[in-house]
Image (cartoon, rainbow, N blue to C red):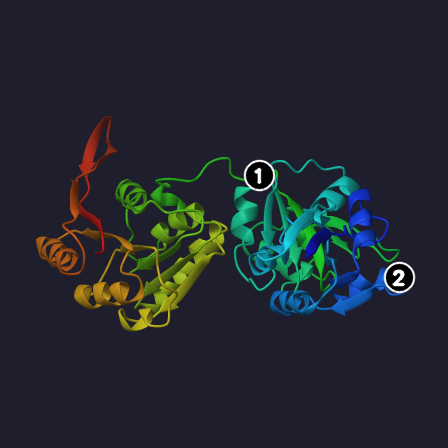
Amino acid sequence: MKVYIVGTGVNGGDSLTKEAEAAIAEAELLIGAERMLSPFKDSGKELFCSYIPQDIAAKLRACDCGCAAVLMSGDCGFFSGAKKLLPLLEEHDVQIVAGISSAAYFCGKLGLSYEKMKFVTLHGHRSNIAINVKLNQLCFFLLGGVITAAEVCRRLCSYGMGDVTVHVGADLGYPTDRIISGRAENLTDCDICGLAVMITENVDALRHIPTAINDDGFLREKIPMTKSEVRCIAVSRLDIEFDSVVWDIGCGTGSVSVEAAYRCPDGRVFAFDKKAEAAELTAKNARVFGCDNVIISEGSCPESLENAQAPDKVFIGGSSGNMDGIFNAIYAKNPKADIVVTAVSLETLNEAVKCFERYGTSPEITQIAAARTEKIGTHTMFKAQNPVFIISGGLA
């Protein structure tokens, strides 16, 4: 059977391309959600209402017509159901017909160029809003579900970005379409809900990935912190990817969590500490640095690790004598995880090496002894920091 997967644009009518119109005209069977099929209810064609890939594939297998068209909102290559449907249609002659995406349409309405825009879907997701706005001058968000435009604005405000410009669009292409623009702090009560789109403009977005952030930039109180020189090496050894899941065990001030979070804007950092004041401080620093992809858990490890998402990368800054149990928990979750441990004592170094050899491979060990300048009278002297061992490697 010939099957067209057709992007119908923003309204499924006026926004249809000529190619899409020709594919729909040729098809004997039209499949799609009710909104997609509505313009063709009097076409005389067979209509099948569904957006579930398995149901669509089953209908096509049972159909004896020569040509069908599956109608998708917007463009088939932009957060579309076509991604899940295509593998189910291998026995058919499938052709994708591109449509006008909500991003292209909305940017056109606003007069914005989108080649450097970061695209994020919030369908079924709750985090990774502030971190992406922090790192990108322009972000496009597909809203829906529990995340509304007002919720995004409130999130930005709570992470120190209330002055970011926000554009919200709903019912694009329809007579009832709405576009609202303003600062995030002024749109926290925006009444646009359901399926909508949002663009953020952050003129103060970071133009680099912060590395070895100055220690004075973090709220400290009396909680231990991994110093910038050690943090720089430790985080770099993890080789964190854009969508990595990272564990920061013994997070303390959250300095490692923050630097890790900047490296995985499409992933998450799970920060653990047995001290309530440390967990609270990590949460405060995550807000200061705009990292809403940091999830904090208070409690002892390895017990706190049992229900956490499996990690790709793990930093252990403090084990409270439970190193073996922590390694065992990591191995149970992901036996291919990369791990970095920092140690200030020979006993912890020895324990970490034994754990690597027991659960993984022989680790690489680096010892760093940094010294910083300090003004004493008219002279500039060097003040030595405690030597630190950085033990890194992978599991078997």
Question: Disc 1 residue type?
Answer: Asp
Q: Residue at x 40, y 47 (%)?
A: 241
Q: Nearer the viewer, residue 66 or 326?
A: 66
Residue 64 location (% of width, % of height): 72, 65
Q: Could you tell me which secondary element the residue under label 1 belongs to?
A: loop
Q: Which mark is residue 317?
A: none
Q: Could you tell me which secondary element the residue under label 2 belongs to?
A: loop
Q: Is residue 146 visible?
A: no
Q: Nearer the viewer, residue 294 or 40?
A: 40
What residue is disc 1 on?
204
Q: Is residue 33 left or right of residue 212?
A: right
Q: Which mark is residue 43?
A: 2
Question: Disc 2 residue type?
Answer: Ser
**Most distant residue in the top direction:** 378
**Mark 1: few/some/many CA within 10 Å (<14, 14-19, 20+):** some
Which quadrant would residue 386 be assigned to in this image? top left
Which quadrant would residue 66 be assigned to in this image? bottom right
- Tell me: residue 122, above or below residue 163: below
Residue 368 location (% of width, % of height): 18, 40
